[in-house]
Image (cartoon, helix red, strand yellow):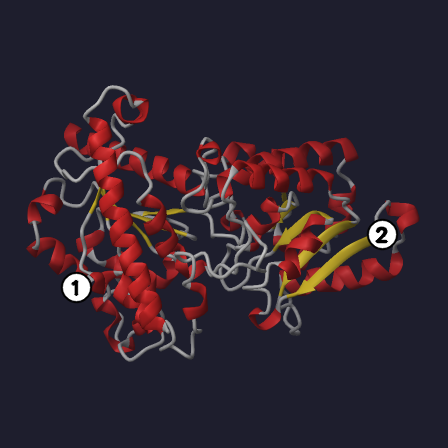
Amino acid sequence: MAYLTHFILLLLINLASSQQISNSESSSSTTTNPTTTEDCNNRWIYIRNLPSRFNLDLLTNCSEYPIFDDFCPYLANHGLGQKTHTKSRSWYRTDPLLLELIFHRRILEYPCLTNDPNVANAVFLPYYGAIDSLKYLYGPDVNSSFQHGMGLFDFLQSDEPGIWNRHMGHDHFLVMSRPAWDFCQPLDNDPPIWGTSFLELPEFYNVTVLVPEGRAWPWQEHAVPYPTSFHPPNLACFEAWIQRVRRSRRVSLMLFAGGGGIGASPNIRRSIRTECENANTSMTKDNTGYSQICHIVDCSNGICEHDPIRYMRPMLQATFCLQPPGDTPTRRSTFDAITAGCIPVFFEEMSARSQYRWHLPEEKYPEFSVFIPKEEVVFKGLKILDVLMGIPRNEVRKMRESVIELIPRVMYRRHGSSLGLRTKKDAFDTAIDGALQTIKDKLNDLSEQ
């Protein structure tokens, strides 16, 4: 089954790639297409032609890492996964690991592609680096993690090396669909510990890397949203969802969808669970206006990961969605909450504010989110409920509207979507804008040296 899926993906992506680049370049020779004559100025992207061993061939190993997971079922629809039900048009069982495949498919529709690297403003590397890392993180090459990416670099140096040497990689960018922490093991660690050393390789220092979570002091990476399960194909489906979000009755004050917090050691998730249990037994609708003070959606053992119905319906009914850090600071749930019009509540700056500057402008966080330092809750007894109940209702309504306005920026619309929906910049479009600007700034800095 995996080989059949791989063959179909390879066929469709190669066909789409050749057609799209041909269409972009034929359009660029005429003055009748405003997209290419005006909008493509300083926006041309060249997709590096990599051997399939660096991308699609890696998908054939989708069931070979039992310690990790079998992601074969989620390869459908170019990485969006299977639809949540047969009549669904916008909802899929999306696995965040497949952001690389999703991004690869979407960039084939980018209107400013060129097959001439000499005129390109940026070079995209369709390398599935996070999927390739699985053999080092969970497979037989765990003791060779420092080699992650070296095969790619050798290819870039040997096959048309002028493309790389033109700017020594400063104009190249790629997507890696795991947190940057997984790729920053120091090269001199002996024996190796967790992670690979891709981001520590001097060979790739100049490359711009898009990841779902960056480090506290990022060097070359920029954070982009985790893919949610919402991928509308047209403007009508998108607007229907927005109307549903606006009309939804918010019967719960706050919601936490996740696992953890059941151990004895003090941490923010344990504090949330304890406060929820106490609030639901001591407070009523009469003194709060809510049918339920706190709703916990138990997502232990990954049961929610590919089943958005478990958490999206409760999120639609909640006013605030709590986003405590887990193994790492960021959460896909942040973007699920925004998609549901649920105001996110953060407990660490690293959970979002210092991460997604392209998609969630830092100066606007007070307009669409609440920040409560986790130390105040865990060690000083600050009640989350007191903070949230203290926000005036009219302010809450304004915050929810600000959240709804962010939905286009954090969703990845379906490939092949309607022209009407393409007028709304989504997470992919915003990431491309950010990557192009970053590369432009780097090249300008180099020219001034």
Instruction: Provide the residue designation for mark 2.
Output: 291
Residue at 74% of width from left, 45% of height from top?
A: 387
Left or right placement of residue 190 versus residue 353 in this view: left
Q: Is residue 133 above or below residue 392?
A: below
Task: Examine the image and state in which quarter residue 402 appears.
Answer: top right
Secondary element type, mark 2: loop
Q: Is residue 256 above or below residue 146?
A: above
Q: What is the three-letter code of the residue carrying label 2? A: Ser
Left or right placement of residue 141 versus residue 69 in this view: left
Q: Is residue 124 above or below residue 72?
A: above
Q: Rate crowding at label 2 as few (under 14), some (14 to 19) or many (20 or more) other CA atoms within 10 Å.
A: some
Task: Examine the image and state in which quarter residue 240 appears.
Answer: top right
Q: Which mark is residue 395?
A: none
Q: Residue furthest right?
A: 286
Of the two numbered discs 2 and 1 on the same chain, state the one appearing first in sequence: 1
Instruction: Provide the residue designation for mark 1.
Output: 151
Percent across and percent down for residue 304 are: 59, 65
Asked whether 367 or 132 is in front, the reply is 132
Figure quadrant of the N terminus: bottom left
Work out whether residue 401 can be spotted.
yes
Asked whether 125 or 84 is in front, the reply is 84
Q: What is the three-letter code of the residue carrying label 1? A: Gly
Asked whether 50 or 167 is in front, the reply is 50
Report the label total.
2
Percent across and percent down for residue 192 are: 29, 74
